[in-house]
Image: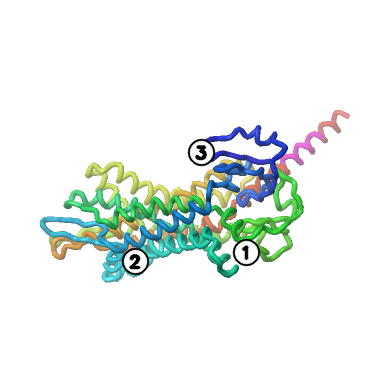
Amino acid sequence: MNSVLDIEKPVKIDKIFQSPRLNLNQALCPHCDLVVDLPRLKLNQKADCPRCHTTLKINWSEPFNRATTYSAAALFMLILANLFTFVSLSVAGLSSNISLTSVLEIMVDQRYDLLALLFMIFVQILPAFCMFALFCISTRMPMPYRLKIFLAKWLILLKPWCMVEIFLVGVLVSFVKLMSYGSIDIGPSFIAFCAYCILHVRAFQYADKTWIWGTIAKAPDIRPLKAGVSGLEQQVKSCHCCGAILVEQSVNCTRCFTTSYARKKESIQITLALLIGSIVLYIPANVLPIMTTLAFGSSMDSTIMAGVVLLWGGGAYPIALIIFIASVLVPSLKMGAIAWLCWCTKTKKVLSGHRMMQVYEVVELVGRWSMVDVFVIAVLVGLVSFGNLMNIFPAQGVIYFAFVVIVTMVASVFFDPRLMWDRRSENLKRKLETNKRSLHLGITKLA
């Protein structure tokens, strides 16, 4: 049971199934726990789970060379992006220039150390570490086995927390907001950062879990499994770190030494606790101002919705729509979606596994993009600093909002999607038993 797709051009699955010369190996889907037979993939083909459509394996062309090239070039562009002027703003004969490092200094000077720390972690430190880790792994440089494991573990774990492209979108949104105040000039660092963003995204395309761990060590051997049946029913489990198939009784993975579980412990309880925390934080995030503008001696506080209304009233409809979707719609829908998934997994009698899986994938994909508003404020704070003429300062609401995004992202990490499919299987078995019982009663009456 398998599903194979060409990354650039779809492949006819039936022909692949009918080929008797394909050497099959097996994978255990990390999202639905289905055992899948994987054929030998051609270049630029990927294998998807036939039940939940999660990508299980990708066979890139020249993955080592491309990952090395993109990661090294990305690190070089990041260095250039921090050396020169990023962008400048001119208002009434006054000019303000910022670099990526000066944004941090300004936020620290204004005693918003936490906001500066979030910017530094998500835009600078984590992306740089991931590119360095990918470079070390792809070049296959000699290093201790434990160090390889450390780099691979954190590369996979931190991948969703690298927000380079989100920061770039935030910069572009801030440009639209500032165009009414004066003229904006981009510096050499902005061009370097755009190149860094593209290279960073391309490098991450090759950071496939199966390929990364395959370069470090071979997966542990295990008895042949029956495809199309869940791993739980066959007393095996998937290592959440490296994806190796392990016997259910094993405690630690023999490849990455990570403690493994057939299902995440207390997944629903932890997810709901984090969800409640995010809802509590979401109230002050929307009520309190996220930034304060000082202009000509007067002060004006802006909430998230006030900023959307201001942009809409100024005719910047696309930007207003982006901010509304990213800062209002996405967090609200994400919290509602997580609550619905937990409720369905725990209590609902009839489930659509595919629909729930689609909701889960959307939650994982779009949740991080809510950080756009936080990065917009970071850029505005750095650029708009003109003494008594005009200044923009971050306000308390932006900290609450940043933690709403972080907590909801952590909640989606703790949620175990395999529980949805477990519940679905239980419901199908219960329905089948009910139908058998009804059929038996009908036959008895006829007799």
Q: Are marks 3 and 2 in contact (CB under 8 Å)?
A: no
Q: Is residue 330 above or below residue 436?
A: below
Q: CA distance from mark 3 to mark 2?
A: 40 Å
Which secondary structure is most common in the magenta stretch?
helix
How many C-alpha atoms fall within 10 Å of the one at disc 3: few (<14), some, or many (≥20)?
Answer: few
| Disc number placed over residue 8 in the picture, else none | 3
State the SS at label 2.
helix
Name the foreground residue: 11 vs 144: 144
Q: Is residue 114 above or below residue 167?
A: below
Which range is magenta? Answer: 431-439
What residue would you read off at disc 2? 116
Three-letter amino acid code at the position of disc 1: Cys
Q: Are marks 3 and 1 in contact (CB under 8 Å)?
A: no
What residue would you read off at disc 1? 256
| Disc number placed over residue 346 in the picture, else none | none
x then y, percent, for residue 156:
53, 58
Three-letter amino acid code at the position of disc 2: Ala
Q: Residue 438 falls in which quadrant of the image?
A: top right
Say whether residue 386 is left or right of residue 382. Answer: left
